[in-house]
Image (tube, rainbow, N blue to C red):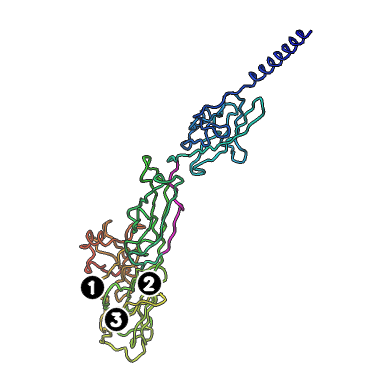
Amino acid sequence: MATSSCILVLTLALGFLTVTESKVLKTSTTPAPRDSPCVKGFSASKYTATISENVNYQLTPVPVSPEIRACRTDTKVVYDIDPATSSDVFFIDNRTGSIYMTHPLDYESTSSHRIDLLIQETHATGNDDGNALLIIDVLDVNDNKPVMTQPVYTVHISESSVIGLRLLTVSATDADSGNNAVVKYILDTPSCPIRLDTITGEVDLIQEVDYELVHQYNCVVHAQETLTRERFSSKQSTIVIKLHDVNDNSPSFTSDMYDFVMTWPPTNGIYVGKVTAHDKDSGEFGRVNYTIENPVDSFLSIDQDGAIRVKDASVDVLQKNRNYTFLVMARDHGKNPRMGQSLVLMRMIEGYNRWFFYNSSYRFQIPENTPSNAEVGLVTVNSSHVKYSFHQKYTDKDFPFVITQDGGSIRLNTPPNSPVDHDGLHNSSSSRWQPQTVSRPYTPT
């Protein structure tokens, strides 16, 4: 009986030992290798990756170094990204730990991404959580062109502005960085009176400007990359330089001296002669008024066209066979008027019973850029029953002047919108418009 009891106890003990051993084998674990840098379930505490912007990694995992994995290989592992640091750009394969992107990265938006990785290990005795840091650096790619900060730059300056005046500074931006964003500035309109600093974009005046010649300059510029292989350029911008007129010219008479002859006795309103002054300024600055200086202005008048007439023939100062010398002044309409003057000789002659030119010769001056149809001067005789014309040899199609039949007004006859040019007219026609070529009036039969 005692023996049987002992056997029974031994059998039960052996049975217990067998059950216990079976449970340990089922849940046994394999410790991590001694040289593994395991930290909270991950094989490393920090993972890194470098990706060029605009590269599409939708089908290929991000090349993380070292490879994201768990320390232990005998557990069920689930990988995740901390929602506090996640974005819609990255996602992780919960089973393999591979990182993927939903769309290409943009260096200009974010140059580096910090992502907290999470791991959950499940084993027989429970669950373990861990975390690690993933840093993804984005490499800049030259994928942007320079952009001028303004499509149009406008500056207003006076025509009297001095050379060297700083007008403005142009600039451009490039969404890239480093060498990919270094640009230079290029002037595409070399005829403009400016210097463009290729590095700073500063624009300076390098030539004198004249409102009477050019009212406005349109200067085209652009920016170009200098340190890239692509050498991307921006779209063009325009620098608009608007000139403001200044009263910087004085009226100038077509002759330094006018010689007029009248038949005695004069009558009220009788025509003496005409003077003409031009002012190269524009608008009000270029419009002139004429005046006669004392003492002869008491019996003479001058209108705004420069025509001089006798206004009072009864004054005692008017005498036959006498010469009168006086100044005619031309004033412009500037705030501080500028003036020019010319000398006039008026002769009172008795006894002529035929027509004659009031002047034996005429000499007129034409400012450069005088527009077509402008009056050059006036030739007159002492009779109203005449018609004027040029000698036949001066009526060819290239002759740049015409004369009115009734009145003797000589006018410039150049093509429309083609003002007189000093070099062209002086060199090609000088032999044809000397003073002795003035018209010869004739009396109608």
SS under mark 3: strand
Name the foreground residue: 418 vs 40: 40
Other residues around mark 1 within 10 Å, as few (<14) / some (14–19) / many (≥20): some
Answer left or right for 134 relative to 393.
Answer: right
Residue at (28% x, 79% y) in the render: 260
What x and y, as percent, mark residue 387? 31, 68
**Disc 2 to disc 1, C-alpha distance:** 33 Å
Residue at numbered disc 3: 262
Give the quarter of the image for residue 85.
top right
- If you read the primary sequence from the N terminus, does the residue marked by circle 3 or circle 1 appear first? 3
Compared with 87, 323 (above or below) is below
SS under mark 2: loop
Give the quarter of the image for residue 302.
bottom left
- If you read the primary sequence from the N terminus, does the residue marked by circle 2 or circle 1 appear first? 2
What x and y, as percent, mark residue 276? 33, 73
- If you read the primary sequence from the N terminus, does the residue marked by circle 3 or circle 2 appear first? 2
Q: Label 1 is placed on what type of residue? A: Ser
Q: Range of the magenta residues?
A: 143-156
Q: Quadrant of the N terminus?
A: top right
